[in-house]
Image (tube, rainbow, N blue to C red):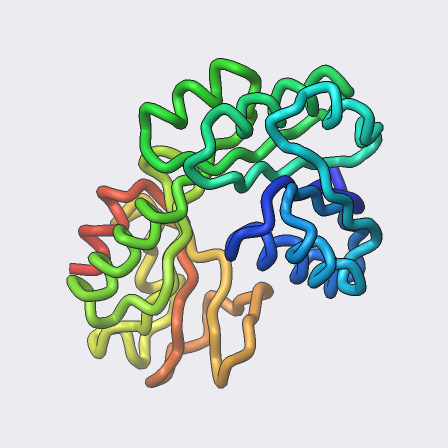
């Protein structure tokens, strides 16, 4: 599904970032918050900005946002407001709802009331920092789901001059190279027979335990 229009509930740091970047990429964005000041700040950056009491489910339903492709609930530690927003979105027919949770317990609660995808930004940031400190060749990683991630890492010295065909990472490590980065450019159509050179980063998808072994 191509996502063309989203609704963002809550304009903290995360909500603003999602709304601004999606809008800048050409998508349509509706933002909802109960703080008039942040609504005014975002008004000229998105298609529609509206002040609504996010704890009032009837007020949320009055927004008629059932046609958006995705709703993103980033209401921080306000569990009640998050629950109200999720219920309202689902009752209006929003197919996919992302919801931010401060911990795993809150995540389970939000999942129970209808959230499709739970976001744990603080936990993920902590894990990201820990992994970056542990593995000096790791540049970035994205957790896709429990136990599965995408990593970007500079190739080790022993890979220089070898091809991906020779390295055969799928057979030897159970992971897949989906792209490489060279001179800050992403190359997705990778020539598996071309020798790797110093400074190349590989972008790899796989199970976390297998990626950890690869990084070691």
Question: Can residue 3 be seen at all in this image of the molecule?
Answer: no
Q: Is residue 80 above or below residue 98?
A: above
Q: Residue at x 39, y 41 (%)?
A: 120
Residue 47 lies left or right of residue 202; in this view the side is right
The answer to which of 98 and 162 lies nearer the viewer is 98
Task: Locate residue 47, reporting x and y percent.
Answer: 83, 53
Question: Can residue 207 be seen at all in this image of the molecule?
Answer: yes
Residue 89 lies left or right of residue 81; in this view the side is right
Task: Locate residue 87, reporting x and y percent.
Answer: 63, 18
Q: Is residue 47 above or below residue 202?
A: above
Task: Locate residue 164, reporting x and y percent.
Answer: 39, 65
Image quadrant assignment for residue 185:
bottom right
Residue 37 lies left or right of residue 215; in this view the side is right
Q: Residue at x 24, y 73 (%)?
A: 156
The answer to which of 36 and 60 lies nearer the viewer is 36
Looking at the image, the residue that sits furthest to the front is: 36
Quadrant (top left, top right, bottom left, bottom right) of the N terminus: top right
Number of marks present in the image shown: 0
The answer to which of 168 and 51 lies nearer the viewer is 51
Task: Locate residue 157, reporting x and y percent.
Answer: 22, 78
């Amino acid at each position: 599904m191509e996502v063309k229009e989203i609704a963002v509930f809550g304009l903290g740091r995360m909500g603003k970032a999602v709304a601004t970047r999606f809008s800048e990429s050409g998508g349509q964005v509706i933002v909802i918050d109960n703080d008039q000041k942040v609504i005014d700040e975002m008004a000229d950056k998105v298609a529609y900005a509206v002040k609504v009491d996010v704890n009032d489910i009837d007020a949320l339903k009055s927004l008629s946002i059932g046609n958006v492709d995705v709703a993103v609930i980033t209401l921080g530690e306000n569990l009640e407001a998050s629950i109200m927003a999720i219920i309202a979105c689902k009752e209006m027919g929003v197919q996919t709802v992302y919801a931010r949770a401060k911990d795993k317990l809150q995540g389970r609660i939000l999942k129970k009331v209808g959230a499709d995808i739970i976001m744990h930004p603080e936990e993920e940031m902590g894990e990201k920092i820990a992994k970056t400190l542990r593995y000096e060749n790791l540049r970035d990683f994205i957790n896709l789901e429990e136990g599965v991630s995408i990593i970007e890492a500079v190739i080790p010295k022993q890979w220089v001059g070898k091809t991906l065909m020779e390295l055969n990472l799928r057979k030897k490590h159970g992971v897949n190279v989906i792209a490489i980065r060279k001179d800050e450019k992403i190359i997705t159509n990778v020539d598996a027979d071309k020798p790797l050179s110093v400074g190349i980063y590989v972008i790899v998808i796989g199970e976390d335990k297998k990626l950890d072994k690869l990084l070691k």
